[in-house]
């Protein structure tokens, strides 16, 4: 498991609106049993700040990462990664800073 890996959403009830999640948490804490992820949805949240939402393509299909909807999931619930978005690192970390630090 690595930061910015993309996985199938481990919550079956949420897969209709968010088929994938991206790991936001750094992979420096392997002993804890949860990891922070953000959902990937097909349409942006029109009420959210643009800094909080970033486009990514998974299997040729466009999605939007909703950083404002981060949550923790059990690490064992995540399957093998199906993609990676390391190229979005700076923008995703700016969104996390905005959420938690206000800038």
Image (cartoon, helix red, strand yellow):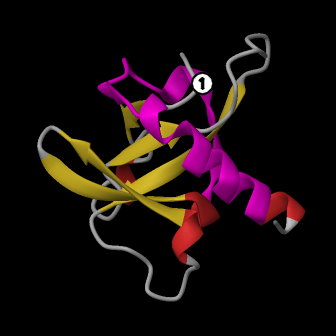
| Point 46% across, 53% down: residue | 39
Could you say where residue 93 lies in the image, as x and y percent from the top left?
67, 46
| Point 43% across, 39% down: residue | 10
As displayed, is residue 72 above or below residue 45?
A: above
**Observer-nearest of 83 and 17:** 83
Which quarter of the rendering shows the C terminus? bottom right
**Observer-nearest of 23 and 32:** 23
Which portion, as a residue range, is magenta? 70-98
Residue 40 among those drawn in magenta: no
As displayed, is residue 75 above or below residue 87?
A: above
Which quarter of the rendering shows the N terminus? top right
Could you say where residue 82 lies in the image, as x and y percent from the top left?
29, 25
The residue lying furthest to the left in this view is 60
- In this picture, residue 61 sits left or right of residue 102: left
User: For residue 67, what is the image quadrant?
Assistant: bottom right
Is the residue marked by circle 1 packed among few (<14), some (14-19), or many (20+) residues within 10 Å?
some
Residue 82 among those drawn in magenta: yes
Q: Which residue is mark 1?
A: 75
| Point 58% across, 78% down: residue | 49
Could you say where residue 35 lies in the image, as x and y percent from the top left?
67, 32
């Amino acid at each position: 498991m690595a930061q910015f890996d993309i996985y199938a959403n481990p919550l079956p009830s949420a897969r209709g609106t968010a088929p994938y999640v991206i790991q936001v948490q750094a992979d420096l804490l392997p002993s804890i049993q949860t990891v922070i992820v953000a959902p990937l949805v097909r349409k942006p949240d029109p009420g959210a700040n643009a800094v909080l939402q970033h486009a990514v393509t998974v299997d040729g299909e466009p999605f939007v990462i909703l950083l404002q909807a981060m949550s923790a999931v059990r690490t064992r619930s995540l399957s093998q990664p199906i993609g990676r978005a390391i190229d979005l690192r700076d923008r995703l970390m700016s969104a996390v800073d905005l959420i938690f630090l206000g800038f």
